[in-house]
Structure formats: structure tokens, C-alpha cells
Amino acid sequence: MSKVKILIFSLALITANSVYAYDDGDFQVWHTDAQEIKINKEFKLAFEEEFRWGDNANDFYYHHYDAAFIYGINKYLDVGAGYRQIYEKKSGDFKEENQPNINVAVKCEFLGYKLEDRSRLEYRHFDYQTDFWQYRNKFTVKLPWKFTRIEIQPYLADEVFLNFYGAAFTRNRFFSGLGMNITKNLKAEIYYLFQSSEGAHKWTDVNALGTKIKWLF
């Protein structure tokens, strides 16, 4: 009888884990709400809330809040500091992560292309695993074309993730999207994201449809 109980318990654990370990190539939906408040010519506050659904967009598994203080040194360089509170589903429960970060963004324009290279250093603090530092670099190119009265503009971006705990290169995200100006104070984006992440035994991929709404104040 005890062996049967152990077998049932083991099967239950395997089932619970498989529910949240999505298939390689999983389709997901990501949505971000953002607000940017301009304090003066150089300083602004940025807030963000993001939601993610996995398992072919049927399972809500990720939610974060983000707040950042940004200083525009000049038109080519922004620096800032922020804090992100993350809740991510792992083995059936939402686990919490606290993530202070610092950011540096270098911007320029070349032949009509708007280029931005953003570096972010994060300290990832957990209650359920070892803390570690992570570096992220995102390079974005806005193409020099705008369409319709809401100025639909295509862009491409790539982001790499490097951590200082275990393996160094752990994730890559490629973005292809369209940005637009709905009104003077409201911007929107729709994009396709291809993400590759290092897992316990192999790299796994995610295909995501993303949307973003950003209010300017």
C-alpha cells in the first residue's frame, strides 16, 4: 500500500511540473501597460506593468511591476535606476523576485535609422533560490519609414542575457514590431518575439505575440 502511495505522489509531482514547463516552441501572449511622467527637461519617471500567458496563451504565469527614474544627460545618453517586482509561476505557485537595476541607454541616428543600445545590470533576489547578478543588452533599430497618420514605424531589436551565476549566456530575445502614435500622449506597439532560453537539459524556444500601450504625461 505504501508503494502505491509513493507511486501516486510521484505521478502527481510529475504532472504538476509538466503543467508549467511549457513545450519547446510554445506560443505565448505578452502585454505591457506603461506610463512616462516628464518632471522637467532632463528628468522623468517611468512605470510599467506586464502580463504573460503561456501554454498556447491559456495559462497566466507571469506578472511584474516596474518603476524607474531616468536622467537624460543629452540627446545621445540616458541613465537611470529602477526596481522591478516579479511574480512568476513555478511548480504551480507564484514565486516572488525582487530586482533593483541600473540602466544606460546610448542613442543616435544614422541615415534616418534611429539606433539605441541599452545596457541593464540587475540584482535578482529570491527567497527560494540563490541570488545572482544579471546583465542585459538590448539593441534596437527603428527603420526610417512611417505610414498613415498615426505614424506606424517598423523596428527590430535583439536582447542578450548574461548572468554571473552558473552559465554566462542564458537567453536571447529577437523582436520585430510596429510602433505607432495613437495621439500626442498615447503610443502603442505590436510585435513578434522569438525567445531562446537555456534550460536544465536543453535550450527551449518561445514564440510570443506582444502588445504595449504607453501613456505620456
Image (cartoon, grey):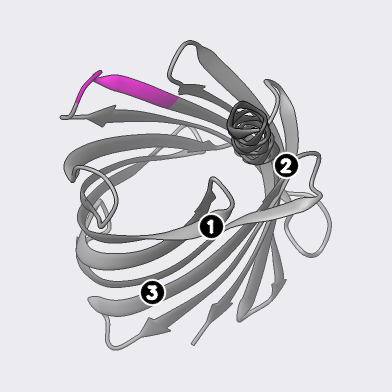
Of discs 1 and 2, which sits in the foreground?
1
Q: Is 60 part of what is drawn in magenta?
A: no
Residue 188 versus residue 59 in the image, above or below: below
Q: At 19% from the left edge and 65% from the top edge, which residue is drawn?
A: 81
Q: Is 167 part of what is drawn in magenta?
A: yes
Q: At 25% from the left edge and 57% from the top edge, which residue is drawn?
A: 127
Q: At 84% from the left edge and 56% from the top edge, which residue is drawn?
A: 148
Residue beneath label 3, please? Answer: 46
Who is closer to the viewer here, 95 or 116?
Answer: 95
Q: At 67% from the left edge and 20% from the top edge, which residue is drawn?
A: 24
The circle drawn on residue 93 is 1
Residue beneath label 2, please? Answer: 28
Q: Which amino acid lies under the numbered mark 1 shown in the image of this protein?
A: Asp
N-term-proximal mark, 1 vs 3: 3
- Magenta-drawn segment: 166-171
Kindly give the residue lying farthest to the front in the view shown: 1
- Work out whether residue 51 can be spotted: yes
Of discs 1 and 3, which sits in the foreground?
1
The circle drawn on residue 134 is none
Of discs 2 and 3, which sits in the foreground?
2
Q: Position of residue 49 (x, y in %)?
A: 52, 70
N-term-proximal mark, 2 vs 3: 2
Q: CA distance from mark 2 to mark 3?
A: 25 Å
